[in-house]
Structure formats: C-alpha cells, structure tokens
Image (cartoon, grey):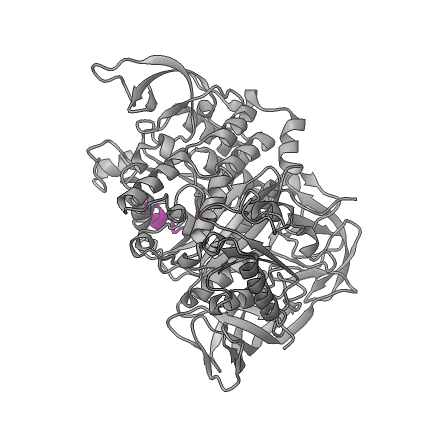
Amino acid sequence: MTSHVLSQLRSLEAESIHIFREVVAEMERPCLLFSGGKDSIVMLHMAAKAFAPARIPFPIMHVDTGLNFQTVLDTRDRWVERTGVQLVVASVQDAIDRGLVAEEPNGSRNRIQTPVLLEAVEKNGFDALFGGGRRDEEKARAKERVFSFRDDFGQWDPKNQRPEIWNLYNGRVHQGESIRVFPLSNWTELDIWAYIAAEKIDLPDLYLAKEREVVDRGGMLFAVNEFTPLKEGETSEVRSVRYRTVGDANLTAAVASEATTLDAIVEEVAAVRLTERGATRGDDKVSEAAMEDRKREGYF
Amino acid sequence: MTETSVQDAMPNDATGQQAVDTSADLLRFATAGSVDDGKSTLIGRLLFDSKTIFEDQLESVEKVSTERGNDYTDLALLTDGLRAEREQGITIDVAYRYFATPKRKFIIADTPGHIQYTRNMVTGASTADVALILVDARKGVIEQSRRHTFLATLLGVPHIVVCVNKMDLVDYSEEVFQNIRRDFTEFASRLRVPDLTFIPISALVGDNVVNRSENTPWFDGAPLLSHLENLHVASDRNLQDVRFPVQYVIRPQSHDARDYRGYAGSVASGVMKPGDRVVALPSGLETTIEGIDTADGPVDEAYPPMSVTVRLTDEIDISRGDMIARPNNTPAALQDIDAQICWMDETAPLVKGKKYAIKHTTRWARAMVKDINYRVDVNTLHRDEDASEIRLNEIGRIQLRVTKPLFVDPYRQNRETGAFILVDETTNKTVAAGMVGGLPHAA
C-alpha cells in the first residue's frame, strides 16, 4: 500500500513539468534560454520529460558570449544531439562586430549580452522565454513570479507583477510583450544537485573536482587558461578545484573541492556555507542591488 | 586540459533513485504579519537556526545592521529583498524562502501583513498547507490577526499555527499566553479552522523556534520547527475524487511513436489507475485508462501533484481544457458560478455587468459579473449587502455567467477544481482570485 505522498524532489519535478506544458499550451513561440550551466541543463532534461515520447516542441537559444569553456559547448552539442531539439545561437561577438554593443572595460560580457538576447528574441518572435533562475539564488529573485511579465522593452517591474495564485498561471500578453518563465523557481541549489545525481544528468565536467592549474585572486581561484592567463607577478598552483557555476570563462572562479563524483557534490553542497553566486561570480559583487538593476534592464 | 562528460562519475542506480524517491516530502507554509510582529525576524531565525543562511548573506546583514547602529544583527534584513523595501523598511511583495531539514523541505511564502497587501496574503495562502499567524504578546489578538486568520480559512489552508511572539517582553507569562489563546480560539470558532495550534515564542531570542525554551516550562507543546516537521499533511489532499484536467495532448510526429496519443496533465485530485473506467468532460463519453505514462516509464497509479500522461483505450475527442473524472463521481458542469473573490486590481474595481477572461484548471472562458451579493469586511467579517463594487484587497461574493461550462467542485472540497482567476481582457492583468461555493464559515 503506497502512502500517496510524493517526495519533495518529485513534487518539484512535477511542478516544473506542469509549467513547461502550460507554457507550450498557451504561448505562441516559447524558447528555452540555454547557457550550458547545470540549471539550464536540468531545465532541458525536464522539458524532454514533459513531452515524451514527442520531441521538445520549442527551440533552445544559447547567447554565446564567445567566452565559453569548450567543454560547455561540447555538452550543449551532446544535448542537442540527444534530444533533437532545435538550437538557436545569438552571438555577442557578432553583435560587437556589428556595433550593436560595445565591449565593457572590465572584460565582462555579462551586461552586454542583454541587448543581444533582446534582439534575438525580437527577431525570432519569441513570446515566452524559459530561464533557469531560482528564487534561492538572490534576494531580488525571491520575489519574482514563475511567469514574469516583461514589457515591450523586455523590462521587469518588481512593483507591477501579476499576482500568481494557485497554479493558475496567466501568460496573456499583447503584441511585443513577453514573459520569462522560471520552471526552477522553487528549487534550491541542493535540490538541483540531488536531482542531477538521481537522474544521472550529463553535465560539463567542470563541475567535478579535478587537479587544475589555478591562480588565487583575492580569494577567488581562477583557472589558468586562454581566458584568464597569468598576469605579471602572479604565480599559479595546481589544486583540486571544481566550478559551482559555469558563466563566462574569464569571470568564473573555481572553488577548492575534493568532490570528484556527483554524490560527493551533493554532500559538499549540503555542507557548504556560501551562496553559489557570492562564492564564484565576480560580476555579482558589484553592489547589493546589482541583480535587481540587471533584471530591470531585461537580464535574466 | 581536456574535459569530458561527467557520466563516468555517475552514481549507481540504487543510490540515485533513493535520493529522489524516499527522501523528505514538501511542506508549504505562508507567514503573515507586519514588520512589527517580528515576522521577518522569525523567518530569519528559522533560516539561521536551521543553518540555511549562508555566510555571505549573514555578513551582508551584519554589515548593514552595524551601519544602521543596531545593537543586534537584524535578521529581518535577510528577507527584505527589493531595494525600495529596504529603503522604506517595509515588505511590498510575496517573497519565497526555502529551507530543509532531514525530514522535510519547506517553502515559505512570506507575505506582508498590512491591509493594503491582502492580495499578497491571498497569493501566499493559496498553495499553503499551513498558515503561520504572528501575534505580539504585548498587544494580543488585533484586527490584523483576525484578518489573516479569515483569509487563511477563506483560502482553505488546513492548518493554522499561532505564534505568540515577543514572549521575552512579557516575562514569559503563561497568563498572557493563555489569554491570547482564549481570545483567538473564541474568534476562530466563527471560522472553519480544521487545525489550530498555539506556540509561545521569541523570534528575536529564539525561544521555542527551533529549540525548546527553558523560559516557558509551563508550555508542553513542541517548538515551531519540530511542529512543522511532524505535521501530518498527507490526509489534507483529496484522494477521493478523480479530477484530471487535460493540459496538453501529446501526439509525436515521429516514426517510432506515430500512433501514440496521450493526455498530459497534473492530477488535481483522486487516484487514477490503469483499467479504471473514466468519463471525459464535456463530451460525457466513457472509456478506460489504458496506461499512465511518465518519461521514466508507465506507473501503476497517479495521484496529486503528479504530472503524467494518460492513454485511453478508445479514440475519443479530448483536448486541452477538458476534464477526466470517474463516471459515478464527476464535478458539476456549471455556467452559473457562485463564488467568493478577492479583488486584486488597483486600477479598477469589479462591477456588475463587466466581462472578464476566466481561467479554471486548464480551461479559459469568458465570464460576466451577473451580480454582487455582498462585500465582506475582512476585519469584522461584516457583510455589506448594498455593495455595488469590489475594490482592491476586498473580498466579496458574486455570481458569474460563463460562456462555456466549467467543471467545478466547491472550493472547500477541492482546492484545485474549486479555484479560478479572472483576467482583465484589456490589460491582461490577473485581477481576482476566485473560490467556488459559499463562505468558509457557517455564520
């Protein structure tokens, strides 16, 4: 006799699948924003589950900053091959070359990817974009809806959000407006890892600990590679490190870790005492309200 | 340096499945109260004492507390998210927080308590298993406590926990606690409160939040966290009435699954099994469940809140917005709906004669307001039967005429098939939360 109680991870999965189906049923042209990071991969994995045995009925879009770890691109291509999903690539380098955006002095392409994203959305006529944002990541996200309405400039107005009651989502938009949809809203970092381990989800192996050559910059460990070469006067060392997020290769730091398996990561995450963005994303350290400002501009 | 796939490092089957299928369940609770009640402090305390707060978050809160000249770390800062809120020292919107213990994962819908934000409380309570109501021990049961309790019962929240907070400021007096308990119980007897619990706490100091307090030896109940961990919520779900709103029809246009036709959706209530006789609404045609599929393979049964795909033995015409039920247990197919609504639009009130879009389960239709029966004063529960409109944050009972039948159950029996939203057809904003059936109290 079963108890008819769904475990919390299966409840979260069921909720996410419900969200995918709801968007596909109600929106004209949805698209999944795919970064190659673990959250977007978990989204893609669940999107495939939501429509099985049919294929995923919408494309995925990769905003390619040109600063990707190769293994992330390889992983992306494996997923495209495996699911048969259509891939749209929006290139930041191309946008720089065309003069749509200009490189920022600090080398971060995080902010300038927003206009590239918005342009691609408009060109393709996407009216719903799935993003991997989770409410546990950051205080501004904690107040964002699952269906997050954007005006025709792609902007988020935190004071003018639609009430979201029960699971009755309202995706109605006028021409030119769109919604961002966050199927992972109620997941925490630990949930994501427990799910990845349970479902054996294929990730870039940057997430696993391994001996890598790194340089310590103000407590942040950057891998020494073409994107983050050693600066004059710096010395590198070989340490066992892994990545907790895989953003742009020139900005994403690794953390010291011995977690060489997914189960070990789950254990490590359960014990860890720094939020993932705070630990490894240089671009979020700018100000306490950094994320809120970026979201207002149309960033995820 | 070559990076490969992580699949080499995958865990074996047994470990992996275990983590997902036998681990903790999920409890959603809503908190209501104002800054003064210590609600944010209580949530900060739960996150802090359950070791969910991260070091960098705590550091940032300590820094701000010091800058403001506070004597103690203001845990409320952990939850006051948006910049406007921090500047004004108030909470504007529903915020969601997460923490977990080995027994359960908790989702907190943290809602501001002020009357202006009734719609946020309604939003937070709509999916909650538990409502936490904070009462300041020095002030006792006030208008706001009554309003929050009324809204929680209106939204059908099955468990209410009253945290009598700031016990440290009344010398942990049992008499103060018992008086509040008596007042509250008396008031609550006019509402349908299935389960009511009182806990004396101090969110600031931590009494009876995570650990039992030595300051309240007269209190023999469990501290808040252990109460929430052990609360039995499985029986709150409706497992009797099979309701499966069809969300999406899966018909693969591929060679290997060309004949597949499955009805995807979330089980709203009841338990479905292959072999069950079912009826599809609105057609009324009967058939049998051939199989229930998930991407992980077929399952023997499906129950809430599972997302599954149902295959039927007969090819009958079913599309999104239709409902699958049992032949001897169907929802009512109604075009005239009697409902309680909470109005959520600041720009215009609900008025008689106006038309809205309505969404009920996966079905959209149009609805006209035929009549406004009365408006309820959320503080006194007084009914104003002469009301001609229902404004922002007001509750009322109305009659709707819908363009096509909705397959409804009374909200009291079914929080899924008894709920709907109204959407303004011009602005596309969600303007009301609606509950089918009469008032949640007998008065």
Above/below status of B162 relative to A238: below
User: Image quadrant for the C terminus of chain B?
Assistant: bottom right
Residue shown at the point (44%, 58%) measured from the top left: B37
Above/below status of B415 relative to A188: below
Q: Is residue A125 magenta?
A: yes
How far from the left and from the top, in percent, is residue A69? 38, 25
Residue shown at the point (23%, 18%) measured from the top left: A231
In the foreground, B302 or B128: B128
How far from the left and from the top, in percent, is residue B309? 66, 48
In the foreground, A64 or B251: A64
How far from the left and from the top, in percent, is residue A270? 52, 31
User: Image quadrant for the N terminus of chain B?
Assistant: top left
Segment colored magenta: A118-130
Residue B9, quarter of the rendered image = top right
Asked whether the viewer can see residue A288, the reply is: no
In the foreground, A89 or A167: A167
